[in-house]
Image (cartoon, rainbow, N blue to C red):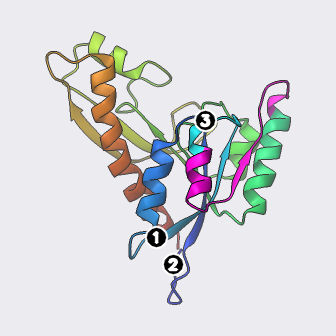
Amino acid sequence: MPDTAGRKAKVAVLISGSGTNMAALLYASRQPGSPYEIVLVASNDPTAGGLKLAEAEGVTTFALSHKGMARAAHDAAMDEAIRSSGAEYVALAGYMRILTPEFVAGWSGRMLNIHPSLLPKYRGLHTHERALEAGDSHGGCTVHLVTADLDDGPILGQSKVAILPDDTADSLAGRVLIAEHQLYSRCLAALVTDQG
C-alpha cells in the first residue's frame, strides 16, 4: 500500500517460537524501498524467543497464552491486539494454532502463511519426513493466503529445495528455512504492493 508519500503497509506477525521468519520479515522491511513495516509481533506463548528479539528491535509485542482459554476467546483477544496496532495485514510465521473461521474471515485476502512444503503436498506437520519417505527429489516452501482450510489458500509463491541423498529431516529443514527467509518477504512485499 505504499503511496507517493511513501506510506508503508502495516503488518502484524504472529509467532509461537524463535521467530526466525519474523526476523527475516523485519530485517527485509528495513531495507530501502520496502513497501511494508512490522508494527506488532504477537504470540500465543509468552516465552516465545521471537518476542525478545522483537522487543530488542523496538517492535511492539503482545503475548497471551492460549492455555485454559476457549479457541474463539483467544482468537478474539489476538484479533483485538492486531487491530489496535493499526495492522492492515497479518503474517503467520510459525504460529502453531489452528485459527477459527471467524478470525480467518476477518482478515480474508490480508493474512498469509509460510508452510515448509511444496503445497498442495504435505499439509500439516512433519513435512520434511514425509518428503523423504516419499522419495521426492525436492522439498521446499510455500507462501499462501490463509483460508479456513488448513494450508489450503491461494499460493503466492514457492521455492524448491533439492533433497540430497544423505539428507535427514533436520538437514533438509535447515535448507528449507533459508529458502523460507528469502521467499516470505518477497511474497509479502508483492501482496501489499498489488493491493496498494
Q: CA distance from mark 3 to mark 2?
A: 29 Å
Instruction: Left or right? Give the position of 128 relative to 192.
Output: left
Nearer the observer, disc 3 or disc 2?
3
The amino acid type of the residue labelled 2 equals Pro
Query: In this orientation, which residue lies closer to the viewer: 1 or 59?
Result: 59
Q: What SS does tag 1 mark?
A: helix
**Residue where numbered disc 1 is placed:** 193
N-term-proximal mark, 3 vs 2:
2
- Where residue 104 appears, as percent x and y from the top left, is 68, 44
Task: Identify the amino acid type marked 1.
Answer: Thr
Residue 165, compared with residue 155, is above or below; it is above
- Sequence-wise, the earlier of marks 3 and 1 is 3
Q: Amino acid at mark 3?
A: Ser
Q: Are marks 2 and 1 in contact (CB under 8 Å)?
A: yes
Give the farthest residue toward the top. Answer: 133
Indicate whether residue 55 is drawn in magenta.
yes
State whether residue 157 appears in this view: yes
Q: Are marks 3 and 1 in contact (CB under 8 Å)?
A: no
Is label 2 in a helix, a strand or a loop?
loop
Q: Which contiguous range is marked in magenta?
A: 51-71
Camera sees residue 110: no
User: Picture coordinates of residue 59 (x, y %)?
Assistant: 62, 60
Image spot of residue 30 (x, y percent): 45, 68
Q: Residue at x 81, y 37 (%)?
A: 74
Return the residue at label 2. 2
